[in-house]
Image (tube, rainbow, N blue to C red):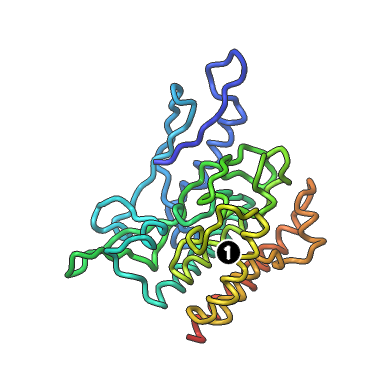
Amino acid sequence: MEFKPYQLRRRSTAPPPIVVERVEKLAKLLAHAKAPDAGFRALLCIAVVPQAPQTRFAFAFELPESSFPLGNAPLDLQQAIKAKDGVRPTLGERFAMATTVAQTIFELHSVHWLHKSIRSDNVIFGQQSVPTDRFRAIYHKPFIIGFEFSREQGDRSTTEQDDRLERNIYRDPDRQGAPADSPRFTVLHDIYSLGVVLLEIGLWRLAYEFEDFSNSDADSIRRSLQDHARDRLPHYMGEDYTNAVLSCLNGTLVAPEVAKKLTLPDHKQQLLEVNMALSEKIIDQIARGVKGT
């Protein structure tokens, strides 16, 4: 289950019509049964239930038996990295995981939607039995969840708000702090978050545990993540994978003039350029890394 909260208008007991419209559009997006086979690895939404007392909508999802054969609860990437009793992914599985996550974001952006909450606890796996007491995730078949703040790129709906390091570390420095002081969320902010997750997959360690970030500001954290990618990733994942991650974290995926126009009302051409760059500089670059291992 996932929950999409909303705020009631003054003297109203029903969700605003615009919220209902957004919920219907999101449910439709997540209701395509063949989507995982086409590269969009999201769970199938089978029902949306309004929960008026909690001022939210509940989204119910199906766990396909082929990906969750044991019938137990999904395991997220954060849990898998922190676990002491799990079998770690092979190098090939890490590349497959990274490719699948990036491809899913590419497919989402291709239909002009933003995720807005890309982080390791929103990447999940099924588990398979192994002849030991340790668990083994089905690493090569991840799913992306956490769509409660997703929106169409032309919309201005709600944004996740908190100031916890374990959430902030996935956010572009431009998107930290009070929402009123932040620029409008764009595809490049999603791609920055993707870069942090790809870095975690490559190093198999959670980003907020790389070092003590408690007294670091947002820009210092970004520079630190870039340093960890440059200094450590080549050893574990190779230069091509490293370059893909740095393209996300450096904000160099597209030219600055293209990035600036993403906040304009009409920016379809710029979105196309970003998605082409996501395909060529990240997905294809990861694929070259696989061939080089």
Residue nearest the observer in this picture, 189 or 85 = 85
Q: How many marks?
A: 1
Residue nearest the observer in this picture, 279 or 175 = 175
Under mark 1, the amino acid is Gly
The answer to which image quadrant residue 149 occupies is top right
What residue appears at the point 62 percent right and 30 percent down from the top-left corner? 18
- Which residue is farthest top? 11
Residue nearest the observer in this picture, 162 or 142 = 162
- Which residue is farthest right? 257
What residue appears at the point 79 percent right and 55 percent down from the top-left corner? 260
Residue wearing tag 1: 195
Q: Classify mark 1: residues with Cα within 10 Å, few (<14), some (14-19) or many (20+).
A: many
Q: Quadrant of the N terminus?
A: top left
Picture coordinates of residue 28 (x, y %)? 51, 43
What residue appears at the point 37 percent right and 57 percent down from the top-left corner? 79
Picture coordinates of residue 115 (x, y %)? 57, 50
What residue appears at the point 56 percent right and 59 percent down from the top-left corner? 105
Picture coordinates of residue 174 (x, y %)? 70, 51
Residue nearest the observer in this picture, 62 or 292 = 292
The answer to which image quadrant residue 58 occupies is top left
On screen, residue 74 above or below 179: below
Picture coordinates of residue 234 (x, y %)? 54, 80
On screen, residue 217 above or below 27: below
On screen, residue 26 above or below 128: above
Q: Secondary structure at mark 1?
A: helix
